[in-house]
Amino acid sequence: MTRAWVRELAGWLSAAAVALVTAGAVASSARADLLFRDGDSLVVAMLARSVLSGESLDWAMSSVLFLPESAAFTALDAGTSVDANGLFAISAVVNLLAVYGAIRLVAGRARTGRSPVAWSVVALSVFGALAMTDVSASREALDLASLQLTTTYYSATVVGVIVTIGVVRRTIDRRTLTPWLSLTLGLVAFVSTLSNPLYAAWATIPLVIVLAIAARRPEVRSQTPVLIIVLLAGTALGFLSRIPLAAWITKTGVGYVQPAQWHESIDHYARLVGDRSQSPPGVIGLLIAAALLVVAVARTVRPRDPGSRLVAAMAWVAPVVVVVGAIALGTHAARYLQPVVFAPVLALVAAPHTLRISESARRATAAIAATLLLIVGGLSIPRLADAATRPDADLACVTDWVDAAGRTGAGQFWTVRLPALHLADASRLVQVDHQLNAYAWLVNRTDFLVGEVSFLVEDSQTVPWDLPEGVLPETIVDCGRYSILDFGSETLPLGPQRS
């Protein structure tokens, strides 16, 4: 028992080291914009801040509600004294640790001839390597693994999908669906779907397909119908529970479905693959993903047991289903394809057999590897901290001016969200479109109650303003990449809300 406890602890410590190395590398690359500054990436932090401030909540969300992500970020924010960037850095590490925990669940129980802890660390390391090959600053690039380090791009959904596969695998290994496993499966499906409908495409549909095919085998025939029912019931309940939250959902998933554009979708995703293949890290990432898919197919064809077969099958079936589905629905968002990078990694823990070397050699190898990981992980802490605390004089110029002014201003989505997050009072910067209409998208709509503003913040991403004729700023404050158009005592009325 003690040895098992020590082994699991060593696994978590190693996973923490891998998470620190990965987060440090990503935060020091061009992907840092997605971690710390991207307009989309800030919604969870802004929502958490609203909750902790005690202000009235009337949020306009997309089809994704980010419920687990917001709960985790709020807990971190309430329990620590670091600033927003520090919380983003901590969240990146926590998100990767959550992936490790989910992978460890998929790997199955430790028993003679198996090393699930070691292989789980290996799987997380490969996923981390994929994340470190992501070098584009664009949110639309096919750099998918690093999205797991953000608070916004479906990190909880990724963990939920892996946990679902893990619970099903544990059930098949046990040859019975216990009440605890049944409750866990249904609860994960319910919460994940409630928060993000993509869970149904990433987990429910491919897993039902795999289970339905597996039901032909006598050793799992009695379990698969119950697993399918529980999974479908949890998913359906999650969809139904979104109905009372409709006031917060400004755009349903139906709005993203455009099947007539399937051919444009193929061209778009093919172009993203081509763009990624233009850099050596991108090529390495593509090769790793392809190799993992080959391993997944091979382990499906030559399985050791039903649980291993299921995990190996999901490692390639989920990416295929998601890619085909994304094209069939005419989507154009790379983030929808994340199973392409996280699902194939599970092939490494489908059958986590112990290497055929002596016990002493295994222990020595594990000790050396763990020690090296901990050393490198420790050395990555300053790197991650440096990325999180890097000064931004332009941003500080805006926030200092707005805090000192004590008035309310406005800006457009991609411009205003970062300064708003770093203000003492985020409601001092209202989100508008170029015609000063209240832009109700991933923001608390109570901000619009102010009704008027007296200055505008703009940068290179700002669409030229369409202001009333003759309205000109009294002064323009230069803040580097930002400019503040100060109208002084004159106020500009906000237009009606739109999303």
Image (spheres, rainbow, N blue to C red):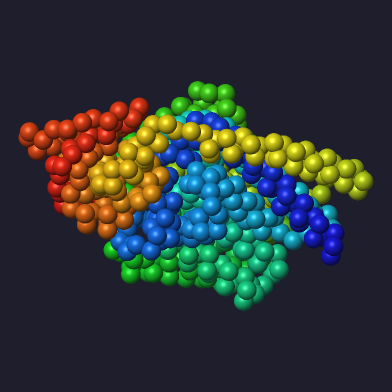
Residue 57 on image: x %, y %: 33, 62
Residue 222 seen in this snapshot = no
**What count of labels does the image hold?**
0
Residue in the foreground of this view, choosing between 26 and 259: 26
Residue 184's image quarter?
A: bottom right
- Residue that sits furthest to the left in the current view: 469
Residue in the foreground of this view, choosing between 23 and 48: 48
Residue plotted at (27% across, 41% down): 411
Residue 77 on image: x %, y %: 50, 55
**Quarter occupied by the N terminus:** bottom right
Residue plotted at (51% across, 59% down): 78
- Residue that sits furthest to the front in the current view: 404
Is 424 situated left or right of 309 in this image?
left
Query: In the image, is residue 447 above or below residue 341?
Result: below
Residue plotted at (49% across, 30% down): 30
- Residue that sits furthest to the bottom in the current view: 179
Query: In the image, is residue 55 above or below residue 132?
Result: below
Residue 127's image quarter?
A: top right
Is 454 situated left or right of 96 in this image?
left
Residue plotted at (25% across, 44% down): 409
Residue 248's image quarter?
A: bottom left
Residue 212 seen in this snapshot = yes
Residue 249 on image: x %, y %: 31, 59
Residue 424 on image: x %, y %: 38, 49
Query: In the image, is residue 403 above or below residue 222?
Result: above
